[in-house]
Image (cartoon, helix red, strand yellow):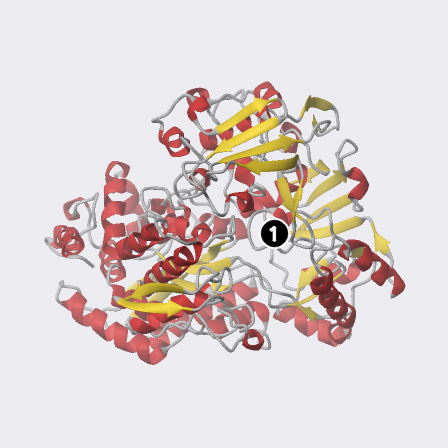
Amino acid sequence: MTKNQKRTLALMLAATMAGGLGVTGNVSAAEMDPTAKAAEAYAANFNADTWTDESAAIYDATLSEFYSIYQSASEAETLSERFALQAVAEAKMLETGVMLPLTTRGGAYGIGRVAPYSINTTLWGNDADRLHSAIVTTEPIVPADRDEMKEKWKELRGTGTYKEWAKEFLTGKGYELKDTLNWINTSDPVTWDVLATSLQADSEKIVQTYDGLMEYDMENEHQPALATEYSVSDDGTVYTFKIREGVTWVDSQGRKVADVKADDFVAGMQHMMDAAGGLEYLVGAEGCNIVGADGYVAGEITDFSQVGVKAVDDYTLEYTLEAPCSFFTTMLSYGVFAPMSRAYYESQGGKFGAEFSADDPNYLYGTDPDHIAYCGPYLVTNATEKNTIVYKLNDSYWNKENVDLTTINWNYNDGSDDVKQYNDVIAGVVDQCRLNPSCLEKAKADGNFEKYAYISGTDGTSYMGFLNLNRKAFANFNDNTVAVSDVTVEEAQRTHAAMMNEHFRRAIVSSVDRGSYNAQTEGEELKLNSLRNCYTPGTFVSLEEDTTIAINGEDTTFPAGTFYGAVMQAQLDADGVPFKVWDAEADGGIGSSDGYDGWYNPEYAKAEMQKAIEELAAEGVTIDAEHPIQFDNTYFAGSEQYTNRANVLKQSIENTLEGMVHVNLIACESDMDWYYSGYYTSTGYEMNGDFSDLSGWGPDYGDPQTYLATLAPDYAGYMCKTIGMY
């Protein structure tokens, strides 16, 4: 922390401590009764006008070093140097303790009828959610057959022959293939407009309805989709795509509404920026840096023709970048590059630029699946809330002959019945499920575990525990009678002061027994498999050449082939912070950041807590067994597993830190109440809780920036809200 940052933080704390502990930033201590409940007091006194300045001060006090190094990576002379500097930046971010890595998807026991690798497994973008390529059998696939298919996929990858081989293999083994896929839905879409959302729960449903310019196939190879070919200018800044002719837009009834043309990608990009669903930064300076993108989003440019997205003619599309972008094509399968029929959008009351308003009573676009246009493999024929979403093959789809699935059913499961997913997969109601501890016990009793169970692979999604550094919400923002905290104003102020202390945060994140925490949902046998130890997976990228960078001022050379995680670990080791984010011996010697608990360290947690107690005492904050820090965590009380997990979190922190922190578990009776405490928030001041463990991030493209940019300041970083800023 620099002198200026320390001074800023000191002034903030000093201003709030007059007459006892006050509140930070935008509400003075005099406006609140310290004994009053924080839920009412903060709601009555919050002033959004100074929120941005307050967020900026807290960001500078906690994450400025991370961001400075992150920015320096953009000036790197080589791609390998860029990756290495990004790894150093992430290490510095992890050292601040603003987040605790928890888990990733996969690494659990499962039973299913979907052939391995028949759905794309690329770590970034939306293509891994596209289901049209799935090969589905009428009976669950046994583990030995799965293993043989996985080995064959490695052999055939890139040849374009795995699909036909897999179908022949399965039928040769006696399996019958079917044309229907039954999938589990745990959260209904909030919107059907893929260009206006940043929620995976939305995009995973909508991506079945449209195609992108290019898409990754089941062999993870990039293939032409709505673009038949593309070229890049000599200076690497202009990408020109030829749009496939003869593709049509249809409505939900399959009736043609327009032809797909280059202008639909221009309309889509402008609408994405107008709607500001949370991902518009991806095409600006924090992403691929399209000319004029940031200016348009900021309102500094009002003429969209000045933005580097242009329809040269009906079937020629051009993107112009400020500078070459090494990962530009990896972004094309993400929702921010989705096309949108301009004519259909306008017919649904849609407008562009300053005239756009989602609150216009005549605006219908994306309100349900009957108010979007389709150019993808499926039409939504039924969408019943908390019940079923049904997709039927689009008869007008340009690639219809290569789609074997004619129907996809998403069946709702609210998670309240721990064995429902297992019962449903055995009954054929769904075709794939994870075996949580309750399901695992039942599967073993039924004899289906030994017969069908396999261990799924992990992916690029990183679920994190986020510490709220500047809490303002002490009840859910959408309903102030739900998930209400019982802490007083004074207790909330003490918690804030503690949260602003780096040693306190490190004490919290190293006090959680993540193995026991994860066992509540994954079972004791596989409790470590899906643990992740960093934000960006350690194997996400590797260095292409020998690369020398400074680690704390000392030139350090990393050989070609060094993984991102190894560089992170080098910086953590140099700083003396004992977080283990990389194990070179894991995964058969390949190395990994998954599958072990590299953060739980009770002795380190106690030492850091003692440092925090001493530093906070100098600021007038007493922490002892009679005056513990109050720490709120919301949880889904309707699920036994999530209830157990919350209790492990509580017991782990309280026991490790010897009563210096008291964890208050705030029950959310429904899954949606839980989601609204953190997942569905739009700003940092809506986050309800001091610790949130219901959200994470999946990569949008093939560069570590896709993770790190989510923590950029000034409303550019989407995940800053989870730590109470912007």
In the shown orientation, is residue 158 left or right of residue 504?
right
Q: Residue 417: horizontal and vertical position, in percent?
A: 63, 60
Residue at 17% across, 68% down: 615
Q: Nearer the viewer, residue 83 or 676?
A: 83
The C terminus, quarter of image: top left
Residue at 51% across, 53% down: 698
Q: Residue 194: horizontal and vertical position, in percent?
A: 56, 37
Q: Secondary structure at mark 1?
A: loop
Q: Name the residue at the left extreme.
A: 19
The residue wearing badge 1 is 186
Q: How many marks?
A: 1
In the shown orientation, is residue 177 left or right of residue 209?
right
Q: Specify the amino acid type for callout 1.
A: Thr
Q: Quadrant of residue 551?
A: bottom left
Q: Residue 560: horizontal and vertical position, in percent?
A: 47, 66
Up-down: is 74 above or below 457? above
Q: Is residue 387 visible?
A: yes
Up-down: is 336 above or below 506? above
Q: Nearer the viewer, residue 68 or 273?
A: 68
The N terminus, quarter of image: bottom left
Residue at 37% across, 52% down: 77
